[in-house]
Image (tube, rainbow, N blue to C red):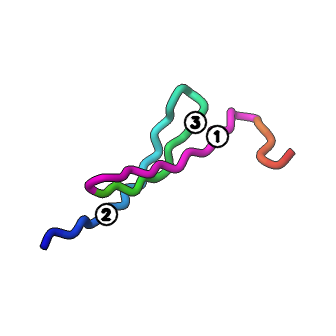
């Protein structure tokens, strides 16, 4: 019997110059991405 084995990959890929993809979990039928806003240089991380 076949069982799907998810694979975790961790990347830092800039999308549209603002969003940053930091990790993804992939299996045969599902892909989950986590996105975080990319801070510009000089931006205050905690307003």
Work out how far the residue at label 1 is from the one at label 2, CA to CA, in angstroms. 26 Å
**Extreme-right residue of the structure:** 47
Is residue 7 found left or right of 46 in the rendered image? left
List the residue tagged with mark 3. 19
Q: Earlier in the sequence, mark 2 or mark 3?
A: 2
Q: Secondary structure at mark 2?
A: loop
Image x and y of residue 38, in percent = 63, 38
For the N terminus, the image quarter is bottom left
**Residue 41 is a magenta residue:** yes
Disc ID at residue 37: 1
Image x and y of residue 23, in percent = 46, 53
Image x and y of residue 15, in percent = 50, 31
List the residue tagged with mark 2. 6
Disc ID at residue 25: none
The reply to whether the C-beta atoms of the residues labelled 3 and 1 are less than 8 Å apart is yes
Q: Is residue 44 above or below residue 2?
A: above
The reply to whether the C-beta atoms of the residues labelled 2 and 3 are less than 8 Å apart is no
Say which residue appears at 42% left-offset and 49% top-offset: 11
Q: Secondary structure at mark 1?
A: strand
Image x and y of residue 14, in percent = 50, 35
**Residue 46 is a magenta residue:** no
Q: Secondary structure at mark 3?
A: strand
Q: Earlier in the sequence, mark 1 or mark 2?
A: 2
Work out how far the residue at label 2 is from the one at label 3, CA to CA, in angstroms. 24 Å
Q: Earlier in the sequence, mark 3 or mark 1?
A: 3
Q: Which residues are magenta?
A: 28-42
């Amino acid at each position: 019997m076949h069982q799907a084995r998810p694979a975790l990959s961790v990347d830092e890929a800039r999308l549209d110059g603002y969003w940053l993809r930091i990790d993804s979990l992939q299996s045969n039928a599902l892909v989950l991405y986590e996105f975080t806003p990319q801070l510009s240089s000089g931006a205050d991380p905690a307003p």
